[in-house]
Each structure stands twice: as structure tokens, then as C-alpha cells.
Image (spheres, grey):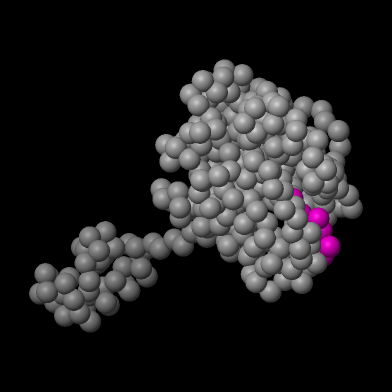
């Protein structure tokens, strides 16, 4: 019984292969495997991955002071696969979390692009969708915020408003001129009345592929400066440290929503995964820029590790102006 069990469960041989190797019948192999289970030689344990994910989600809810946390199981090494799974989970959550007639601000990024693509195309929510930043030329479609705003509104139902300005003004003169534009002012005024926001969370340590995409906008000197001042992540190219404090001069000329404005929305979903995003997720939560999170097992486990190993993170979140939680009126 023990030999048959080892060959079957450990060596991954088929019952026919075991029968041939031991010169016994296949029926005898099957009988011995059943008897091995009955007598306790073989014990089969089925682990529910979602129970452990719920424990991780509960830990993150408490440590990050968030209303809702969803953790998807599995530790995929393929970043594209992680983004697709996060996108699907976030899209299912948004179907119920986004309320009819919400004014939704949407950010950008490859994970957020997967969220938008995974949304069901059967919505009648009568939304108004507003880009939270300008666009960038000659860059990946997943960073084209207008495209995502349009698809988001079409799938869940509603209209979208364009924000036809560059994400980063080329100099201060252009920046001030854009801020003075009436069209720009109208969109920025809408940022003050958002009821929901859906954003990706970036980290300062860009991977080589992302760094190449932003080569024209963020040089090595700027990256070095951001690390020196303690930046760990960004939302819509607005940087913050691990305690959630915004870094006001992180990237000059940015045309996007201010981090403090995000806190005014009732529902603030951040979507990000991977261990490299852990510190950025902590900073976004501590700053109050998100109150709901969809992440993966790898990021969630790393966040728990950071809290266990870093005493400053174990203190309560710094005092902030109160903001409405998910499901509460704005």
C-alpha cells in the first residue's frame, strides 16, 4: 500500500504504469490506493484558498484602516497575468460598488486598463466619468486616460467628459496658461464633486518597461530626488511617502487631481498588485486617498511583513480630516 501510494501521489505515475512496474493488475492498484486512504497511510487535505485570502483581507482592513479589501489568491510571476486577474476582480466589485448617477473620477495605468476592459457591457447607471489627469503622447494605450474614461462610461452606462491637456506641461509658463483655461477650470471644478474614484497605484521603483515609457517625462535625476525625499508611490503622478504625506514638488508641471481632493469622494478604490507595490499601497491607504483596495496575495503578504518588521508602521494612522466611507453619503 505504501509503495503504490508513493508511486501514485509522489512520483505522479498512472495506475497503469504502477501495475506494469509492480507486475500486478490495475484493479489491484486501485484497491490498494483506496485501502491506503482507509487505513490512514494516505491523508488528503483540500485547502480553500479563499479562506486564507479572507484572513489576509481582514488583516489589511485593520492595518490599513480600509472599508473594503479584496485579495485574489495565487502568486503568479507573470505581471500581465496578475493585472488581468486584478482587473477581473475589481470589475466584478465595481458592478455593485458604483452607484447610479455617480460622478466617477478615473485614473490610469496598465492594471486600471484591465479593470475597464473586464467591465460588463450592460450598464444603465447614468454615470458621469471624469479623467483625473491629462494624457501623454506616444505612450502605451493603457496610459491613455481618455480612452479608459470613454470605455468605462459606455460599459456601465453614462457619459464622459474630456480633459484635453498634457499630463505634464513642458514648462511653468505653459502650466500656468493651461490652469487659466476655462475648459481646464471646468474639469478641475468637477474634481471637487466626485462621488467615486477608481485609480491605479504606482511605485517609485519603476520596472524597466515602465521606465522606458516615461523616459521623456522622468529622468534619473528626478527619480533620485523622489527616492531621497522618501516617495514610495503615486496616484495620477502625484507622489506620497509611506505615511501618506503628499510630496508637493514631486514632479513639476503635472496636470492632475491633487491627492487631497481624492479624499472628498465617498468611494475611493485603489487597484494594485505585486510585492513591489506594498509600500505604495500602505502610503495610499494611510493618506486616505483610497478607502477600498483590490490586490493580490503577494502584495498583501508583503504588506503584513512590512507592518511586522517596521515599528513606525505599527503606530496608528496619522490624524486626518474625516471623510465618508464606502456606502455612506458624500
Q: Is residue 310 magenta?
A: no
Residue 29 occupies quadrant: bottom left
Q: Report which quarter residue 256 is drawn in.
A: top right
In depth, the one of 105 and 196 nearer the eye is 105
Residue under the point 53% across and 25% down: 223
The quadrant of the rendering that contains the N terminus is bottom left
**Does residue 32 appear left or right of residue 80 in this picture?**
left
Q: Can you say whether 274 is above or below 312 in the image?
A: below
Could you say where residue 100 lies in the image, as x and y percent from the top left? 82, 65
Residue at the (48%, 40%) spot, across then down: 213
Give the total number of marks visible in the rendering. Answer: 0
Residue 52 can be seen, yes or no: no
Name the one closer to the observer, 318 or 245.
245
Residue 105 appears at what percent x and percent y? 74, 50
Q: Position of residue 303 (x, y in %)?
A: 58, 37
Residue 114 visible (yes or no): yes
Q: Locate residue 48, reporting x and y percent.
A: 52, 60
The answer to whether 110 appears left or right of 99 in the picture is left
Q: Tell me which segment is drawn in magenta.
A: 97-105
Is residue 104 inside the magenta stretch? yes
Above-or-below relation of 120 to 254: below
From what the image shows, is residue 168 above or below residue 18? Answer: above
Question: With 168 as the anchor, is 297 left or right in this view?
Answer: left
* Closer to us: 330 or 56: 330
Along the line of sight, the residue nearer the viewer: 183 or 28:
183
- Residue at image position (44%, 61%) is 45
Amino acid at each position: 500500500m505504501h509503495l503504490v501510494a508513493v508511486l501514485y501521489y509522489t512520483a505522479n505515475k498512472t495506475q497503469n504504469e504502477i501495475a506494469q512496474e509492480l507486475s500486478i493488475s490495475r484493479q489491484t492498484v486501485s484497491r490498494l490506493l483506496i485501502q491506503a486512504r482507509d487505513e490512514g497511510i494516505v491523508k488528503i487535505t483540500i485547502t480553500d484558498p479563499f479562506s486564507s485570502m479572507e484572513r489576509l483581507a481582514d488583516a489589511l482592513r485593520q492595518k490599513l484602516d480600509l472599508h473594503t479589501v479584496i485579495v485574489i489568491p495565487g502568486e503568479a510571476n507573470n505581471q500581465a497575468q496578475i493585472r488581468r486577474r486584478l482587473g477581473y476582480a475589481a470589475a466584478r466589485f465595481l458592478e455593485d460598488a458604483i452607484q447610479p448617477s455617480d460622478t466617477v473620477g478615473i485614473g490610469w495605468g496598465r492594471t486600471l486598463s484591465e479593470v475597464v476592459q473586464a467591465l460588463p457591457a450592460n450598464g444603465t447607471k447614468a454615470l458621469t466619468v471624469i479623467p483625473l489627469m491629462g494624457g501623454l503622447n506616444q505612450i502605451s494605450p493603457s496610459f491613455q486616460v481618455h480612452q479608459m474614461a470613454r470605455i468605462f462610461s459606455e460599459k456601465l452606462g453614462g457619459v464622459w467628459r474630456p480633459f484635453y491637456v498634457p499630463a505634464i506641461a513642458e514648462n511653468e509658463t505653459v502650466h500656468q496658461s493651461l490652469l487659466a483655461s476655462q475648459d481646464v477650470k471646468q474639469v478641475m471644478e468637477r474634481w471637487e464633486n466626485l462621488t467615486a474614484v477608481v485609480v491605479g497605484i504606482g511605485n517609485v521603483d519603476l520596472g524597466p518597461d515602465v521606465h522606458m515609457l516615461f523616459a521623456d517625462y522622468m529622468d534619473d535625476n528626478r527619480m533620485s530626488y523622489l527616492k531621497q525625499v522618501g516617495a514610495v508611490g503615486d496616484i495620477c503622478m502625484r507622489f506620497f511617502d509611506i505615511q501618506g504625506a503628499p510630496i508637493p514638488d514631486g514632479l513639476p508641471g503635472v496636470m492632475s487631481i491633487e491627492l487631497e481632493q481624492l479624499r472628498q469622494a465617498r468611494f475611493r478604490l485603489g487597484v494594485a498588485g505585486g510585492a513591489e507595490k506594498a509600500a505604495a499601497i500602505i502610503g495610499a491607504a494611510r493618506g486616505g486617498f483610497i478607502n477600498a483596495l483590490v490586490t493580490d496575495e503577494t502584495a498583501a503578504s508583503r504588506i503584513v511583513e512590512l507592518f511586522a518588521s517596521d515599528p513606525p508602521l505599527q503606530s496608528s494612522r496619522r490624524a486626518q480630516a474625516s471623510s465618508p466611507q464606502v456606502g455612506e453619503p458624500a
